[in-house]
Image: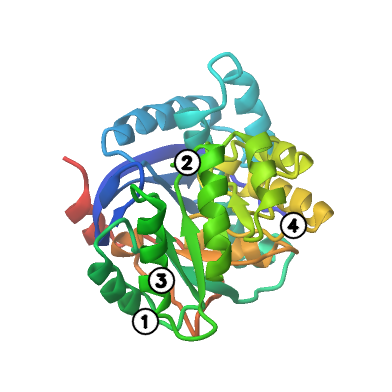
Amino acid sequence: MNVPSLTIRAVRSTPVEVPMNHVLGTSRAALRAAPLLLVDVETEEGVTGHAYLFCYMRQAAPAIAVMVAAVEELVKGKPIEPEETWRTLERRFTLIGVQGIVRMAMSGLDVACWDALAKASGKPLVEFLGAESRAIPAYNSNGLGLMPLAALAKEADELLEGGFGGVKLRLGYPTLADDLAAVRAVRERLPKGVALMVDYNQALTVEEALERGRALDGEGLYWIEEPIRHDDYAGAARLARELATPIQIGENFSQPHAMEEALRQEACDYVMPDLERIGGVSGWMRAAKIASARGVPMSSHLFPEVSAHLLAASSTAHWIEYVDWAAAVLREPTQVIEGRIAPRRDPGAGLEWDVQAVERFRMK
């Protein structure tokens, strides 16, 4: 890999809050807006790399921005060397722990640095990583939260626009009967061949997950996602052994070593790292090697713009999760063509801000 020489001049962050097109009701909370932190790495050479972080709560954005500023103090004037920079920051933040908003700030820097390097090389990120561009099958994850059955059916129709090969439904209703009714209401609206994934967002105990999972085994689901606490790998391994429906986990893997431990315990059938939790582009590529060594299909969690590049560079690429939460502040949002998402062809990771939109949605 011919790596351009770039030096960090500044690291900036801008908090925005973008309304969601569909309210996302999960077993933990109902999300009506997407609080994002836009991260820009400016270089002495005039190239600017971009990234964004999903903050989950509006109140978290200022705290993450403070950590981004702390990271800037440590990297300003240094060359862009993402993997070495990660190791340096990891050593610096060992005592507080590379978790939570510390890890998110580091991941935002990492993604923006890779974006800058790919731009300076004149290549799309996937090609800069040494891979060939390819389109990845996409499922729509923009809606189908916990809601009345009639609303579920209507929203299922809306999510199929764009030719998606799958949709995701959130479960965790008060009773198993409610979960089954929701699955069947959505399944009735899906054309033959469209996959239906379900996500519990960690709502169940192991015993509850076994009871509901056994009932769901007859419903033809593509996977059951995070039915129990995300770091209960022993419990997840039991579910993976005893249920016929594949178990999907991974959005909460904190850096690649967590994924490695989960796979060592055979805690799942599929994995789906999250860009800001796995450790940015650098962490993702290490995770992809772990998945490849074990032959485990790997999907993405959120961030479809960058994830398209990373999945195309991952040998066990499976599905890309599509959400449009950043579309409102992007100059050219992600395109879904015949149910697939391909990496953008212009240099970098495909993130360029719509400046006017950023100002419109900037948090006050």
Secondary structure at numbered mark 4: loop
Please state, as top left, top right, bottom left or bottom right, where the C terminus lies in the image: top left
Give how far across and how far down residue 303 sits, in percent: 47, 57
Outermost residue toward the right? 293
- Disc 2 from disc 4: Cα separation: 25 Å
Residue 12 placement, left or right of 247: left
Q: CB atoms at circles 3 and 4 under 8 Å apart?
A: no
> Judging from the image, what secondary structure is the residue with disc 2 in?
loop
How dense is the environment of label 1, judged by Cα within 10 Å: few (below 14), some, or many (20 and up)?
few
Residue indicated by mark 2:
204
Residue at image coords 73%, 67%: 131
Q: Which residue is denoted by mark 4 in the rendering?
A: 296
| Label 3 vs label 4, nearer the camera | 3
Residue 165 seen in the figure: yes
Q: Earlier in the sequence, mark 2 or mark 4?
A: 2
Q: Could you give the CA–CA distance between mark 2 and mark 3, rounded to whole angstroms?
A: 20 Å
Asked whether the viewer can see residue 221, the reply is no
Residue type, mark 1 in image: Glu
Residue at 36%, 74% (x, y): give it.
159
Q: Amino acid at mark 3?
A: Arg
Residue under label 3 = 184
Task: Report how far apart the C-alphas of labels 1 and 2 lie in the structure.
Answer: 32 Å
For residue 343, what is the image quadrant?
bottom right
Mark 2 or 3, nearer chain start = 3
Viewer-nearest of discs 3 and 1 = 3
Q: Secondary structure at mark 3?
A: helix
Q: Is residue 291 above or below residue 223?
A: above
Rounded to the nearest whole Å, what is the CA distance between mark 3 and mark 1? Answer: 20 Å
Does the CB distance between marks 3 and 1 fall below 8 Å?
no
Q: Amino acid at mark 2?
A: Leu
Q: Which mark is residue 161?
A: 1
277 over 322 or under it: above or below? above
